[in-house]
Amino acid sequence: MKIFITRPSVLIFTFALGVAAVFGIYSILSRNVETVAAPRIYTFNHGDDIAAIYSRVLKDKGYHDSDVFIEEFARDDWSFGSLMADKGRVPGADADTVANYRDANSKPSRINEYFADRPRTEFWTEDLANDTFGKDGIAGWKTFYERYSGSKGIVRFSNVGFNTAGDKALVFLSNGCGSLCGLGTMFNMAKAPDGTWYIAYEKDVWFS
């Protein structure tokens, strides 16, 4: 009886050839499989709309990722109450939109998730605020611009309120840029038939 002894080099070559063949077949088959991105799951309803609204306001008002901080928590602006002094009405906004806005802003909420498609966004955090303004108050703006000389300041958004149909929205943006430098603006947003959001009306509520 003959005994065949296979050399180790032959075994290694055979194994490598098999792996290459399997990989080649997989590569061919995978070309015919369409890759579908998993849908983004947001914390709140209207997540895609909220992300689009924030992005549209920043774009239309000339704020770029590289020249402004976004405060990581959305909250109502102190001046919004003055707009609703007249029986709870806001210029250009429906009653149900205002009601939803007030409900959405009953407490602050983190908004980082709505900027996932803007990887260069820099968020203004509580740690940064304490480190910059904690000891000096408004005098901390000098420190701010020493560290971030090219910045246009810190943008804060409110949470977004929607009408019942979901095709109108209300959002507030404030920009702090110094001890006597800032602007607070209300935006009434509308959704076009193609699904894009645009600014239908805006009003500067305060400035300094």
Image (cartoon, rainbow, N blue to C red):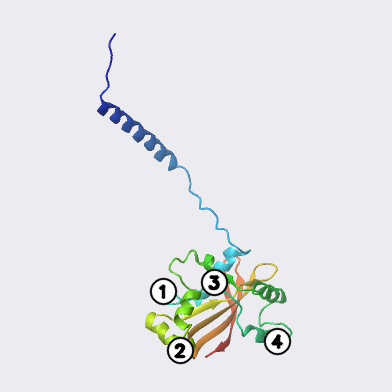
Residue 173, picture quadrant: bottom right
Q: CA distance from mark 3 to mark 1?
A: 16 Å
Residue 143, horizontal then vertical, whole percent: 41, 84
Are the residues at dot 4 and dot 1 in contact (C-beta closer than 8 Å)? no
Which residue is depicted at the point 28% across and 14% down? 3
According to the picture, the residue beneath numbered tag 4 turns out to be: 85
**How many C-alpha atoms fall within 10 Å of the one at disc 2: few (<14), some, or many (≥20)?**
some
Q: CA distance from mark 1 to mark 2?
A: 24 Å
According to the picture, the residue beneath numbered tag 1 turns out to be: 66
| SS type, badge 2 | helix
Q: CA distance from mark 3 to mark 2?
A: 29 Å
**How many C-alpha atoms fall within 10 Å of the one at disc 1: few (<14), some, or many (≥20)?**
few
Left or right of 75? Residue 123 is left
According to the picture, the residue beneath numbered tag 3 turns out to be: 54
Q: Residue furthest front?
A: 135
The earlier-in-sequence mark between 4 and 3 is: 3
The earlier-in-sequence mark between 3 and 1 is: 3
Left or right of 29? Residue 79 is right
Residue 27, horizontal then vertical, whole percent: 40, 40
Residue 75, picture quadrant: bottom right
The earlier-in-sequence mark between 4 and 1 is: 1
Amino acid type shown at disc 2? Ala
Q: Is residue 181 above or below residue 58?
A: below
Residue 129, horizontal then vertical, whole percent: 48, 79
According to the picture, the residue beneath numbered tag 2 turns out to be: 139
Q: Depth check: give the residue in front, 15 or 20.
A: 15
Q: Depth check: give the residue in front, 89 or 135.
A: 135
**How many C-alpha atoms fall within 10 Å of the one at disc 3: few (<14), some, or many (≥20)?**
many
